[in-house]
Amino acid sequence: MVQLIKIDANDNVAILTEAATKGTMFPEGVILKEDIPQAHKVALADLKKGQAVLRYGVVLGYLLKDVPKGGWINETSLALPDQPGLDAMEFGHPCPDFLPDPPLETFEGYDNGPDSYAGTRNLFAITTTVQCVSPVVDQLVTQIRKSLLPNYPNVEDVVALNHAYGCGVAINAPDAQIPIRSIKNLMRNPNFGGQIMVVGLGCEKLTVDKLLESEEINKDNVVILQDYPGYGAMMQALLSMAETKLKVLNERKRTTLPLSKLCIGMQCGGSDAFSGITANPSAGFASDLLVKAGSTVMFSEVTEVRDGVHLLALRCVDKEARDKLAKEIGWYDDYLAKGMVDRSANPTPGNKKGGLSNIVEKAMGSIAKSGHSPIVEVIGPGELPTKHGLIFAATPASDIVCGPSQLASGIALQVFMTGRGTPYGLSEAPVIKVCSRNDLKQHWDDLIDLNAGGIATGEETVEQVGLRLFNLIIDVASGRKKTFAEQYGLHNFLCVFNPAPIT
């Protein structure tokens, strides 16, 4: 049965659990004035032009025309409010609620030493310095899988860290630090076991000294293709180096480790109006369980937190975190302004079809995936964390850019919430997909790993779904389960964020 869902007592709109037709009556005394799609907003009172529309207890925007009680409010109805300022934001007032106690505090992972996060997979990664070498590396991966990998059964797969960076770029531009550190840190992801293999061309701008420490630049770790007389010779050298790395990785074994060794990422994509009340809050509850157990959890997507930045600042544990939050968000404001756009460029046609009228509404739902834990640190895209706990990693919101940025920051597993549906996946780390509504799970039963839609219909609570997600995270991290994206080999291109000029 179709229902209205109101989130905050002050809200003057509610969303529909199902599409409904003109004349549909609700116990709240609302009668629909027109046909309204699933997840879209219904006015709960007569609202006037210029009046604030409230959902989540915040102002989504101001009406561009009168809307009667039972009327439809969508992306054409609202003018955006001013975005929150970044100066002198309050901090150090995290939610007073106690974090929930996790049912367990260990998992089965690949230990990488006392000062490193553990791996959830045992992968052999080959890093490229420039796109020019990618065809050779792709052929190398094919040959490794065919002729070498069967001899090393403890190594789960080989992945090529191909990217579009490396040459034809302003390598010394200030913003070039972002793609360079991203690639440098990506090759050291916990799932790769510390084994480094870099393939360069020989004439590119991204030279190996920008990625490796001086003691790492040697014939054991680096192959420069222009040094070899032809394809056969270079392939022989590449296979020989690969086999030495595989021998080391094959000795890795899963052991019981504390959850403080686990670093995961939270991301959402293809969001809808249910995301902020089902999938994202349940992910937030799972995040709180993980943080209480000692894990590190990252959430990201600058434009999708921009209108709630003041709420995040309150949860920052100290001035350093608050100031870094303001710095990273301010940098992104300037980055968007250079392209003559602002945060309103974010919502997609699919977001709007799913009931999200603007970026404010999307942001309020997006923030829910961070739970209630204090924010212990803020990092830039591709930066490494220095603390354990909840971390805001300031990445773009684009799915295929956020994912690689979080990988570079050290996640060994990602949880991905979606309302509209996407086959998104990463070859470098498992991705658990959580959907926001029951009908998406029914439609894509063999692509969605966990359904949070029962929260909207009252079949489950946020806490129940969050606990199921927590247990699934532990099972996937421990290698007991594979996600659908892993099973099918659904892996997106590695899109490294590069805001610097291309020459």
Image: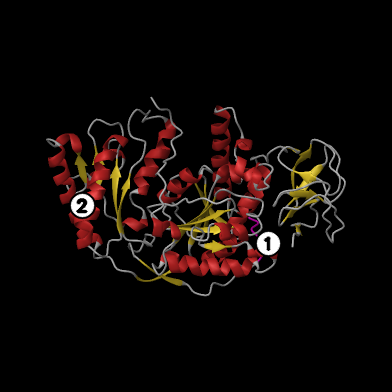
Mark 2 or 1, nearer chain start = 2
Q: Is residue 502 above or below residue 52?
A: above
Which residue corresponds to the image point at 71% horizontal and 37% vertical from the top-left?
82
Q: Residues within 10 Å of mark 2 (few under 14, many from 20)?
A: many
Q: Is residue 155 left or right of residue 379?
A: left
Which residue corresponds to the image point at 63% horizontal and 46% vertical from the top-left?
309
Q: Is residue 498 above or below residue 150?
A: above
Residue 53 is situated, as x and y percent measured from the top left of the image, at 78, 45
Quarter containing the C terminus: top left
Residue type highlighted by circle 1: Ala
Q: Which residue is mark 2?
A: 242
Q: Which residue is mark 1?
A: 456
Q: Is residue 322 above or below residue 295?
A: above
Residue type highlighted by circle 2: Ala
Identify the magenta region.
Answer: 91-97
Q: Nearer the viewer, residue 248 or 30?
A: 30
Instruction: Indicate the secondary structure of the residue bearing disc 1.
Output: helix
Quarter containing the N terminus: bottom right
Foreground tag (2 vs 1): 1
Residue 470 is situated, as x and y percent measured from the top left of the image, at 52, 67
